Image (cartoon, rainbow, N blue to C red):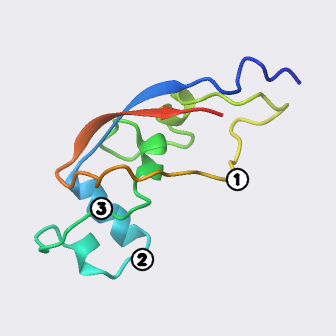
Amino acid sequence: METEGYLNKWVEQPVSYLTRDLLLYAAGIGCTENRFLYEHHDDFEAFPTYPVVLGFKGTDRDIVSYPSPAMRAGAQTPTLPGAQVVLDGERYIEKIAPIPTDGAELVMKSKV
């Protein structure tokens, strides 16, 4: 299988989120800490793993299909016969700065 065209190539993708998205994510994963669930908490912050969903969500503000348009626009993997999507086994997040709690429009960089 030819992989040269896929490996170690950065793909940039626009992504965005709102405060509402941070709250829904925290509630959806079963978080019970108020600092992640209540936007008026003195120490309100985004749950640390929230950025993982940006690759699925992209810039959409509503429910998305699976695989989403953002997933299809992201880093491409070598094709496998009969497969539409590939399940990854690992994600790496490096926290450089706090995730803005007012929402943001960002550019996500990813590679295989």
Q: Earlier in the sequence, mark 1 or mark 2?
A: 2
Q: Nearer the viewer, residue 94 or 100?
A: 94
Assign a secondary structure to mark 1: loop
Q: Residue at x 78, y 28 (%)?
A: 79
Label 3 Cα crowd, 10 Å radius (few <14 / some 14-19 / many 20+): many
Q: Amino acid at mark 1?
A: Gly
Mark 1 or mark 2, whichever is nearer to me = 1
- Placement of 76 over or under 26, stated as above or below: above
The image position of residue 11, as x and y in percent, is 52, 25
Which mark is on residue 46?
3
Assign a secondary structure to mark 3: loop
- Residue 61: name its quadrant: top left
Marks 3 and 2 sit apart, C-alpha to C-alpha, by: 14 Å
What residue sits right under mark 1 in the picture? 89
Residue furthest front in the image: 96
The image position of residue 81, as x and y in percent, is 85, 31
Left or right, 1 with respect to 64, comes to: right
Q: Amino acid at mark 2?
A: Gly
Q: Amino acid at mark 3?
A: Ala
Left or right, 24 with respect to 94, comes to: left
Q: Nearer the viewer, residue 60 or 43?
A: 43
Mark 3 in CB contact with mark 2 (< 8 angstroms): no
What residue sits right under mark 2 in the picture? 30
- Residue 108: name its quadrant: top left
The image position of residue 55, as x and y in percent, is 48, 41
Q: Residue at x 82, y 34 (%)?
A: 82
Label 2 Cα crowd, 10 Å radius (few <14 / some 14-19 / many 20+): few
- Placement of 88 over or under 1, stated as above or below: below
